[in-house]
Amino acid sequence: QVQLVESGGGLVQPGGSLRLSCVASGFTLSWNAVSWYRQAPGKERDLVASITSAGGSPNYSDSVKGRFTISRDNAKNTVYLQMNSLKPEDTAVYYCNARRVLLSKTYTYWGQGTQVTVSS
């Protein structure tokens, strides 16, 4: 069964850190471009960070650049999002997305999301 499962969310004070994990089952995550999105209440889902399958330089939204780091552990079929210096405006549900183009067909998978709340 193809599945993405996020974990690592929770409640943290401003300035704190969290590490989110995205674990894939049923497929090889390293063959996919992987992105983290987030969606705050009443807002659209926004791209936060992404990493290609080829291991190129990651991309970050301006709002998280310098504070968040996306990385892979291919042996664990996992992608991480290290979040430092968290701010209240980082509060959202964070989703993992994996995407692969094969023979002109795009395969896209989403996780169920993990809640991150930044509050004192």
Image (tube, rainbow, N blue to C red):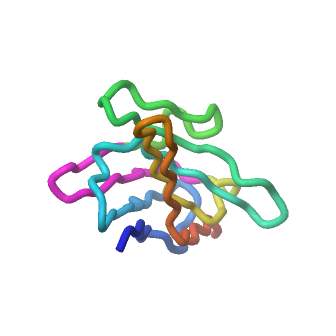
| Percent coordinates x, y for residue 34 in the rendering | 43, 45
Horizontally, residue 50 falls left or right of residue 32, namely right
Asked whether 17 or 42 is in front, the reply is 42
Across and down, in percent, residue 112 comes to 54, 72
Q: Does residue 85 show up magenta in the picture?
A: yes
Magenta segment: 71-86
Answer with left or right where residue 117 lies relative to residue 80.
Answer: right
Q: Which residue appears at 50% of the width and 42% of the height?
A: 105
Task: Determine the residue located farthest toward the top in the rendered image.
Answer: 57
Task: Indicate the quadrant containing the C terminus: top left, top right, bottom left or bottom right.
Answer: bottom right
Residue at image x 56%, y 65%? 13
Q: Residue at x 33, y 64 (%)?
A: 23
| Residue farthest along the left direction in this orientation | 75
Residue 116 sits above or below residue 64 on the image: below
Q: Residue at x 63, y 31 (%)?
A: 62
Compared across the picture, whether 25 is left or right of 58 comes to left
- Quadrant the N terminus occupies: bottom left
- Residue 112 relative to residue 119: left or right: left
